[in-house]
Image (cartoon, rainbow, N blue to C red):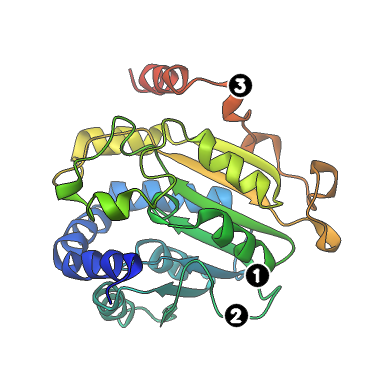
Amino acid sequence: MTTAQDTINQYWTERADSYDAHHRKQLGNAEIKAGWTDVWRRALPAPPARVLDVGTGTGHVALILAELGYDVVGTDLAEGMLEKARAKAAALPHPPELLAGDAVAPSFPDASFDVVTNRYLLWTLRTPAEALANWRALLRPGGLLAAVDSTWFPSGVAPQTLYGRDVLSLLPLAEAASIDESAALVRAAGFADVTVTPLPDILDLDRRHGVADGHEVQLQFLVTGRAAQGGSCGTDGDAGPEVPPSRRSRPLAEQSEGAIAARADRSMS
């Protein structure tokens, strides 16, 4: 019997060639690579922190972080994607470890990572709340979650282009109207000091260099949160090391996405 997860895995495996071609082109562009490198360098603690990149795909995040000197493990259930990631990683002096693994329930000991990252993953999870709780358990006290995503299909998505309606109906964030829906789940999973930071520089790069076929240019966001010190599920008071003010942003409940996009437009005019 084919499960919903089987359908999702098959979709991404079949799309591995075209997906990887786009990302090879992106990371082959020095300006785009520098833009994404800056996003992660600003968000993460200094290397060689130990990082788990869940839903690593063809290695976009894992490869950048490995080049920066992080100790990186990347996991994905789509073998076609992992094959592409491993081929690229082989060229690095200190490649990430790339393993087949479930993003929702990674099979690692608790408190074994300093950082959990992902990019374009939350929207495609059937059980994002469960995944977030598991990721928090994998983090050491004060460890960081850093996830990049957007509201990709706020007006709905044509099911013939993605998974099928029976699978789409199982993805709570696939057609989210606001990134605050993702942030709310991060808070509910027990992360402290949750912030949402818009990425106008990435928006500018996408506008100038284009996005993958079938996609639209959209403002993306970095959602971060910290595993509380002492194993608490807690409050901001238990969040561990203070996040520098330059990295803080108001919760999205206090900001409209239209206002954020307008500020991004002004910053590029």
**Residue sitting nearer the eye, 5 or 112:** 5
**Residue sitting nearer the eye, 265 or 99:** 99
Alpha carbon separation for disc pair 3 and 1: 30 Å
Mark 1 touches mark 2? (CB < 8 Å):
yes
Residue 168 locus on image (x, y percent): 31, 50
Disc 2 secondary structure class: loop
Which mark, residue 254?
3
**Label 3 is placed on what type of residue?**
Glu
**Vertical order, 260 against 185 (above or below):** above
Please identify the quarter of the rendering in which residue 203 is found: top left
What residue is drawn where x is 50% and y is 20%? Answer: 256
**Vertical order, 248 against 185 (above or below):** above
Visible in this render: residue 172? yes
Please identify the quarter of the rendering in which residue 70 is found: bottom right
Residue 184 locus on image (x, y percent): 60, 39
List the residue tagged with mark 1.
138
**Label 1 is placed on what type of residue?**
Leu
Alpha carbon separation for disc pair 3 and 2: 36 Å
What residue is drawn where x is 57% and y is 49%? Answer: 43
Instruction: Say whether disc 3 or disc 1 marks the residue closer to the N-terminus.
Output: 1
Disc 1 secondary structure class: helix
Alpha carbon separation for disc pair 1 and 2: 7 Å
Visible in this render: residue 212? no
The crowding category of the residue bearing disc 1, from other C-alpha atoms within 10 Å (few below 14, some 14 to 19, many at least 20), is: many
List the residue tagged with mark 2.
108
What residue is drawn where x is 40% and y is 40%? Answer: 150
Residue 53 locus on image (x, y percent): 48, 66
What residue is drawn where x is 66% and y is 80%? Answer: 109
Quarter of the figure with the N terminus: bottom left
Residue 52 locus on image (x, y percent): 53, 69
